[in-house]
Image: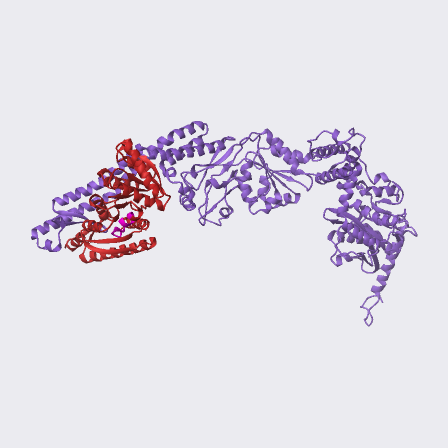
Amino acid sequence: MSQDALRSRIRRILVALDASSASIAALEGAADLAARLDAELSGLFVEDEDLLRLAGLPFAAEVEIHSATSRPLTAEAMEQSLRAQARRAESALSGVAERHGVRWDFRVVRGAVTTEVLAAMEEADFAALGGIGGRATGGGRLGDTALEAILKGERPVLLLAPGGTLREPIAALYSEHPSAGQTLDIAARLAQRDSGHLLVILLAASPAAQARLEREARARLEAQGVTPSFRPLGSGGPWAVVGIVRKEHVGTAVLTGDPAPFGGELAVTLVEEQRCAVILVR
Amino acid sequence: MTRGAPLPPDALYRKADVSRWTFRTTADLPDTVEVIGQARADEAVRFGIAMHHDGYNLFVLEPPGVGGNQIVRDVVSAQAAQEPVPPDWCYVHNFDEPHRPGMLRLPAGQGVKLRDDMEELVEDLRGAIPAAFDSEEYRARRHEIDQAQKEREEKVFESLGEDAAKEGIAMIHTPTGMAFAPMKEDKIMSPEEFGQLPEEERKRIQTAVAKFRERLERVVEQIPQWRREHQERIREVDRSVIRVAVGGRITGLKERYKEFPNVISYLGAVELSVVNNPEDFRGSEEAEENPFARALAMSVAGGGAPQRRYQVNVIVDRDGTKGAPVVYVDNPTHGELIGRVEHLAQMGALVTDFTLIKAGGLHRANGGYLMIDALRLLQQPYAWEGLKRCLSAREIRIESLGQMLSLISTVSLEPEPIPLSVKVVMLGERWIYYLLHQLDPDFRKLFKVAADFNEEMERNPDSELAFAQLLATIARREGMRPFDRGAVARLVEHGARLAADSERLSVRFEEVTDVLREADFWAKQAQHEVAEAADVERAIEARIHRSDRVRELIQDAMRRGTLLIDTQGEKVAQVGGLSVSQVGDFAFGHPVRITARVRLGRGEVVDIEREVKLGGPIHSKGVLILSGFLGARYNPGKPLSLSASLVFEQSYGGVEGDSASCAEACVLLSALAEAPIRQELAITGSVNQHGAVQAIGGVNEKIEGFFDLCQARGLTGKQGVLIPASNVKDLMLRGDVVAACRAGQFQVYPVTTVDEAAELLMGVPAGERGADGKFPEGSLNRRVEERLTQLSEQARAFAARPEEGQKPAEGAPS
């Protein structure tokens, strides 16, 4: 795919925000990516209807994680809290977008978070999601959402661990998959802005296929001014990717969304355990 | 010796006794290591360095130029070479109290080995520990623990969520926590829907929500404890990994240093620290390179950046040395002596750790000898106090001046004190020793041995030969050409001249050595392969010439009549005295005109110099003695009724000393007797109340000063100088003066009494009081006494005459 084609393909990057540090990290990564791809940011804040319903119940109370004590909830207070969160999210978005010099818009919707985010993803070309870690005990709302988006969404997704950024070295998985070319192009686009070097992990069924894939990838990357180096995945299977990422200290991995082991589960492992930024291309 | 006869020429200059000299040049003489002329000091130094008891430190009383420093250094170095090499001293991190670095004592050369071993260990661990943590096994184990913790937390929440779900309750996240709410068709029940429920159902839900909330509270309360347990499990795994990585290496080191319990103990602490602080080796290099992180680490931990704490700071390394050290501290500041803790400026803060401890002179000299210049030591603030404290406590405790004086109270390093065993040799002039001895009680306790160096030694054939040997040794050591016997003899004679005593030799070898060097230079100029007496003579003359600008000015002023000094003829009440001036280290003599006037008075001799505060106390004392001399000798039993005034003519600077008192006595007698004084003679010497002439200083310079003026005006053969007979032994006159005396053109007269001097000066017999109680008719003393009697009678008559218009008192003679 040519650069122009790639650029036309990714014009809007969705960032789902809840004003938590995890989603702000995703925001930073998304703005960085938008700047690299000349895309615009589309911020989304979902006022969770479940929370509003909860707060309206006469016995509503929450157990605070930091103090392990109960605190009564009211509908009015919850409304105010959500509005304040939305304002903080918008403020964060404008600040980050302006710093990266990208266009942005922001909207607030009310509904079920996952449903609304998945719906918004359909309208965007790309989604940036954070907050995967710690979903069991805190800040996990968006974490759950991110997990859902990885598993159910059909758009490319950027996943970042809290505090994570898009950083070098950049690695891309290249295979027979129809989206492999696009995967390589996005990775090349990122590499162009940095050192111009890309680590290509080859997934092939046979040595012959591997040689062919390497030739294809080399030609495609060199046409874009990127210098590749290759690592065959060999017989290690999908999880060998984790070993390569660790050994090469990979900062950003661009993966093909499926088959399944290379998609969601591998992405989650890389983000959670290697604190590596992952772009899932679908 | 005949009274009034001049000295024979041989008495004016004592030549070196070369009769026992068998050498032709100094090349024939062996080197000498003997300390000549300093037997007392040499004995004291040897005693001082041999005495191994507290307080037996040495103070070397060293007059300038004697070379005591080198002599003591040679003796001490020779002794030190026989003694064992003292240990190395190191400072290491104190893992229990980082601000109190610990010290390690190791045999010579082992300190550096331990330092290198520790560096190697750290280097090994920098690779081994990250590798151990990067291994698949560790990662798997760590992943297992993390997963277990994650699952434990997730499980408890899931379990809670599932239990709640069974009762139709959902557990949901809120912005700051978690909450429970009833479900309806996969959604949270709205308040309206809840309100439509039967009362009983509402109560059940509320009770269930309350129950789950309580369970949640308990779960949330447990989580921090679980996380602590999780961290502890990780740490335990980390420790076990590190133990494997470190243990073998530390064990190897322990085996190597098994003979040194302190090192074994230190290595144990190192092992414990590495095991408990794996992050020291796992962290990125950023912390090492980032000054902010390093400063923060140093200031917070107080023990230096990670890994630095495992270094060994060898402050005293004796690897490859022989014998005990002899350390001379040239700049004995407090820090240079006691040691100091340096600081690094980082991010605007001053930080330090044990690696910045620097040794002082005491550390380097520990187990040996420390030499210090006393004056320099005393000039440095608190250096003397610091030294005394260390010597008294027998340990070196490094403290900054700020700490010592309690000026600052910030936490700083307090290095463990190092036991001190040192012999201190302090060198200084006598006045410093006497001042310290008098004013500082500690000094007496700490410096019990004084080595007092002489400025002179007895002159005899043995000492002259020893002197020659020393010159030969110096000439050879400094690569000079040989000196022939004549040159050596001249240098020996110059040594006597420097001592201002023909029977002694100066041991201010610095100056003698300077003449030696300069003679070598002139010999080279003259292309002499062997330096001769003429080269030495030229060196001495050139030294004088370089310094005698002022002498020449004064001589010139006398020759041109600006300064009025007669060298022929006769004058009443005027005599040529002799004085010595000192310009820098050059002393020279010159004549001065002394005059006297007498008149009726109350028996006082007025010293005009004293009246105008130009005379010093000793000079005044000399003049006052004259009153005693006159009063006792003439008209006994009658009051002196004269008023005499004495003055140094054309003297505009201060006058000190009593060496002109004989001249003053003579000029006073001349004034009283109105007997003219021969101006071709000058006189020096002090006088006592009995009229005996006493020794003075600078006799050679004084004679030469008058001789130079006479020579410039033309020697008449009658000119000469009167000197105290007791100064004859001091004569080492210049060659030209001796030659003139030998030729009868100039004379030096020894005198023992004022009468003797007066007879020579005035050509009149002094006369002795006869059996009739009177001096002989026509004698000088007779004339003096008659004049004093006359003045006395005038005074009585003057006192008896009533004032005009005043009645005589009742009963008074009329």
Question: Image quadrant for the N terminus of chain B?
Answer: top right
Vertical comparison of B548 with B604: above or below: above
User: Toward which corner of the image does residue B256 lie, by quadrant?
Assistant: top left
Closer to the camera in the image, A93 or A208: A208
Give the residue at the far bottom of this rendering: B805
Shown in purple, the chain is B
Answer with left or right where residue B600 lies relative to residue B401: right
Please state, as top left, top right, bottom left or bottom right, where the C terminus of chain B lies in the image.
bottom right
| B730 magenta-colored | no
Residue B768 lies left or right of residue B614; in this view the side is right
In this rendering, would B702 be left or right of B60? right
The one nearer the camera, A170 or B185, is A170
Q: Which residues, given as a range, are shown in magenta? A: A5-19
Residue B28: x percent and y percent? Answer: 75, 29
Q: How many marks?
A: 0
Q: Measured from the top left, where is residue B707 in percent x and y?
A: 84, 47
Q: In the image, what residue occupies the spot 55% across and 42% down?
A: B336
Chain identifier, colour red: A
Q: Is residue B785 visible?
A: no
